[in-house]
Amino acid sequence: MSAQLHQRSGPRRVVWLVDDDRSIRFVLEKALAGAGFLVESFDAAEPALRALGTRSPDLVFTDVRMPGMDGMAFLDKLGQRAAQVPVVVMSAYTDLPSTVAAFHRGAFDYLPKPFDIDSAIDMAQRATAREAPAAETDWSDEGLVGDTPAMREVFRAIGRLSRADLSVLITGETGTGKELIARALHRHSPRADGPFIALNTAAIAPELLESELFGHEQGAFTGATRRHQGRFEQAERGTLFLDEIGDMPLALQTRLLRVLAEDEFYRVGGRELIRADVRVIAATHQDLRGKVERGEFRADLLHRLDVVRIHLPALRERAADVPRLADRFLAESAREMRVATKHLSVDAVRALTRYPWPGNVRELRNLCQRLVLMAPGAQVLSGDLPEEVRRSAAAPAAEASWLKALADWSRQQLELDQADLLETAKASLEQVMFDEALKLTGGDRQQAAKRLGCGRNTLTRKLGPKKRG
């Protein structure tokens, strides 16, 4: 093991370098020491872990591929023994999948090999400059409300990324608040003083999207009467948020990939090469991996965008957050309309919590706006809610009722020692559901099968000869 320990004096920050490549250690050690850091180098993970028993660094740089314990296992061990220490993972581009996995395990940032010395120094300064926002931070000032485990994990991810400058892919159903997360990532990033530019790629006609992204020169096409600055130029030294990235045409995906890979682009119809100092955050409600398999999305672009992924849960998956969100939206709507704030009754809270919210947070916000305007009293009662919300409140009671009846029937039959009880129950259940589905659809077997989630042939076969006439 080759290690060089610089004696600590004053408030200087201590950085550990863990890499089996002597030349990498030498170059980084000299650069970081010249920038004022105290540096200790290790040629493997095991001696670094032993050193943790006597001292602790302020930052760790570690390679991914090393003899003995690799960088991923080392990262796990550091998380167990020194979770407060930020870790920068070093890797060649071919190790990018491993690097992505490292972020999900708590890495602060990654340094691709071969690396730029100034980038390494800047990364070390950012990593040791200030503490990241914790999960316990009050994120309501960002418009984010949530105390469920899923949302606390989202907040932790924002905190971990606060000093990083990585591409992020935000996934989740429509209406879950992906742009709010993107804005929070920007405000808690090294680019916070730069612009935040948002573009919904699904809302722009495909033939206009290229110009919106990259701009165009005068005369580039019919109607281009003057030079137009695109979103990449507008977002210079800031963040560009590309919402619904899954709807981007394949041809344009190729251009976007080049910008992400080379940090440069041309305006439409232009010859001047423009440098792009922009962080890209993308979002989608679609399964991009499925689109890759179908040839609808570039795999290499997905890898560039999906360095770190943040998944936003659907509102129905965090029902406990609904009352706090509703209170916030009612108060916001009352301020906007300059009327008194309304409050939810216990029955209204129960109904809102049980509703599945297919439109997610956006649907809840819209409902609260309507309630502020339309609910007659200072307190919102369950009767003030839309019919579909009130029905959802009654559904659990109905479900509990038939399940209790099923339990009573099962107990009786089991006591009578009935033969083939499970098959009898399954056949009876299918018959009842088939009959009710046919009543609901007016005898349309195809629609009935669709509602039940089975094939039309299955339904016809199960009904038997008597039902076919």
Image: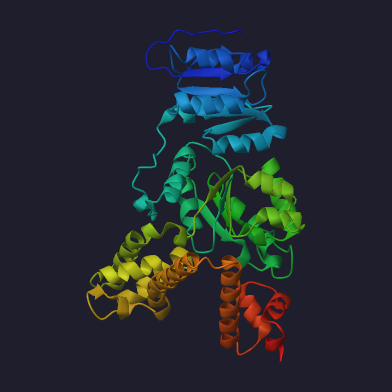
Q: Viewed as shown, does residue 348 lie left or right of 459?
A: left
User: Where on the picture, by quarter, is residue 91?
Assistant: top right
Would residue 346 be visible to someone looking at this image?
yes
At 49% from the left and 55% from the top, the residue drawn is 313
Can you say whether 225 is above or below 149 in the image? below
At 66% from the left and 72% from the top, the residue drawn is 454
Can you say whether 414 is above or below 450 in the image? above
Could you tell me residue 403's position as x and y percent?
44, 69
Query: As drawn, which residue projects farthest toward the front?
Result: 416
Could you tell me residue 16's position as x and y percent?
52, 18
At 67% from the left and 16% from the top, the residue drawn is 21
Would residue 273 be visible to someone looking at this image?
no
Q: Nearer the viewer, residue 210 or 150?
A: 150
Could you tell me residue 309's position as x and y percent?
57, 46
At 30% from the left and 74% from the top, the residue drawn is 372
Q: Nearer the viewer, residue 84 or 420?
A: 420
